[in-house]
Each structure stands twice: as C-alpha cells, then as structure tokens.
C-alpha cells in the first residue's frame, strides 16, 4: 500500500515483536509462504479478474483499484504469497505435519469478491485456502470471521456453495455494507451495533455460531482473524478487549477438537492499532499453540 496507509508492514512486525516478548516465537514452526498458483487463485476468483490484477500491477509507482486499495510494485508478489500461505497451511495440516496454523500475511483478503478487489484486499486468501481444502477432498469446511468488517468477499465467493459454512461477526452499519441475509446451515451473519463489546460478541458467537457449527460438523476450520473489533482500533467502533480474543480462540479450538481433528487454518485480516494487534494476535496464536 502507499506510504501512510493503515495496512502497513509494521503490522506484521508488531505481531512478531509481541510473540518474541511472550516467549512464543521460538515455540512455533515457521514456514516461508510459497506463491499461490493461478489455478489455486481461480478456484475463488474469476479468471478475467485475476488476469486484470496481473495486468495492472505496476513496475513502479502506484495504481488505485479503489480509493483505499492501492497496488505498488511489491503488492502482487505479497498477495500471491498471502494466498499461497493458506494453500500451504492446508497441505501441512492434511499431511499431518501440523494441527493448526496461523498465516501472518498481508495484504488481507476477506473483502475481495469473486471479481472485485476492495477494502485493502486483492485476492481472498481465506477463500483460496478453503477452496484448496475442498479440492483436496474435504466435503465441509467452515470460515469464521471476527474482523470488525463484514467478510463480504468470502460470502460472495461461497454464496452458492453448500460445502462452506460462513460465520461472520461485524459492526453494522459499517463498511462495506454488503452483507446478505443469514441462511440456516450455510451463512450466519451476526451484526453488532457500534459500541458493542464483549457481552454482545460472546452472546452472538455462543447463541448463533456454535449451534450452527455443531449441526454442520465441519472437517476443517478457517479463521479470518481480524483484530480491528478491539476497542483501541482506529478503523472500527466495537469495544472488544484482549481477553475476547483468547475466548474466541478457545471456542474455535473446542469446535475443531470435536469435529476437525483439531485442524484450524487462521489468517490475519485487519487490525490497525499496532499495540492491540500485537497483543491480541499473540493471544490468538497462544491459544492455537496450546489447543
Ligand atoms: Zn477489518
């Protein structure tokens, strides 16, 4: 992204710094992400859209795809690795080389629709990962999205795919204003009003997400882990606290343990207060590590 943009490389450094500070960094397996292939990306995106992203990627300077989604010379290489990280994580889990994974990637992905880049997102990383798992032979996967912004891209990509259960908690009304209605057994949208905090979030997850997950019995869980619903975040108006990220991770671990042999692929979406992002991502990763 362009200089001064909130979706900045310092975000990943803030997470690494906090993992080191808490003694977690050296307890993790680390893998450098490979690039996603065009075929992997095209499981989630229209081939003409993918070709357009490649064609518009600048060798120098910046290209604006929308007012806040800007490509520089390193954006496409980063987006290919971000998407590739998800496919690679799925392969590691299916090979039994890890039980769960956190993909510390940027740019984020959950706003990218089948044929549109938007909201800092170019390719929908989590959707590419979920599609990769389905292509590998799984029959049912769930995508859980607790970013402050609705996961419209993931919703769009899997709108007609009954093999995917999508649960999304988000501030409403708020960007991107594209949520469709809930569909039992397929889509669980739990909007929260500005100012809502722990109690409302936990009630939505416990009351709406968990029963649907029980009924769906997914074989692998994917997490769009955005940390911008935190009270300190400058882009969101929800009031989650650090402990809520440990709590939601414990809920996800519990579902994964009962239905998915523990398999969780989580990926970074938003989170723009660097201190809160570092702390909450570390709590999430610690919860995955101890699952
Ligand atoms: Zn967000």
Image (spheres, rainbow, N blue to C red):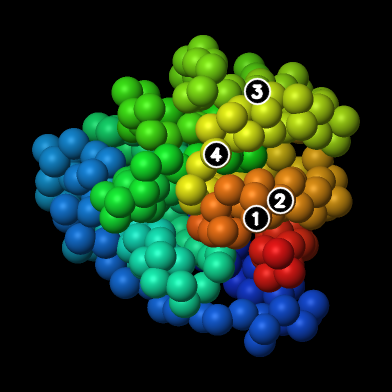
Quarter of the image where one finds residue 278: bottom right
Q: Is residue 102 left or right of residue 139?
A: right
Would residue 1 be seen by someone viewing this image from the given angle?
no
Disc 1 from disc 4: Cα separation:
11 Å
Q: Position of residue 123 (x, y in %)?
A: 33, 47
Q: Say whether disc 3 or disc 4 marks the residue closer to the N-terminus.
A: 3
Q: Are marks 1 and 2 in contact (CB under 8 Å)?
A: yes
Residue position for label 2: 254
Q: Position of residue 152 (x, y in %)?
A: 45, 29
Disc 1 from disc 3: Cα separation:
24 Å
Disc 3 from disc 4: Cα separation:
20 Å
Residue position for label 3: 190
Residue position for label 1: 257
Q: Position of residue 37 (x, y in %)?
A: 20, 60
Q: Say whether disc 1 or disc 4 marks the residue closer to the N-terminus.
A: 4
Q: Say whether disc 1 or disc 3 marks the residue closer to the N-terminus.
A: 3
Q: Residues within 10 Å of mark 3 (few under 14, many from 20)?
A: many
- Callout 1 secondary element: helix
């Amino acid at each position: 992204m362009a200089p001064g943009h909130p979706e900045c490389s310092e975000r990943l450094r803030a997470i690494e710094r906090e993992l080191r500070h808490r003694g977690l960094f050296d307890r993790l397996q680390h893998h450098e992400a490979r690039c996603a292939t065009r075929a992997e990306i095209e499981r989630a995106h229209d081939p003409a859209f993918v070709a357009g992203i490649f064609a518009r990627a600048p060798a120098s300077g910046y290209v604006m795809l929308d007012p806040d989604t800007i490509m520089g010379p390193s954006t496409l290489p980063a987006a290919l690795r971000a998407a590739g990280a998800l496919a690679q994580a799925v392969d590691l889990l299916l090979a039994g080389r890890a039980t769960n994974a956190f993909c510390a990637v940027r740019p984020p992905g959950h706003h990218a629709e089948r044929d549109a880049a938007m909201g800092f997102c170019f390719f929908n990383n989590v959707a590419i990962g979920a599609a990769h798992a389905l292509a590998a032979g799984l029959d049912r996967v769930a995508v859980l999205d607790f970013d402050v912004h609705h996961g419209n891209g993931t919703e769009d990509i899997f709108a007609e795919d009954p093999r995917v259960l999508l649960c999304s908690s988000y501030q409403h009304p708020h960007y991107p204003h594209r949520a469709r209605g809930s569909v039992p057994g397929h889509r669980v949208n739990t909007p929260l009003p500005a100012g809502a905090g722990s109690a409302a979030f936990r009630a939505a997850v416990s009351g709406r997400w968990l029963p649907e997950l029980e009924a769906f019995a997914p074989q692998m869980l994917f997490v769009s882990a955005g940390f911008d619903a935190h009270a300190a975040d400058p882009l969101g108006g929800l009031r989650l606290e650090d402990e809520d990220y440990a709590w939601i991770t414990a809920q996800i671990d519990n579902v994964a343990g009962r239905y998915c042999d523990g398999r969780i692929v989580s990926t970074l979406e938003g989170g723009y207060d660097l201190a809160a992002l570092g702390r909450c991502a570390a709590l999430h990763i610690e919860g995955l590590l101890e699952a």
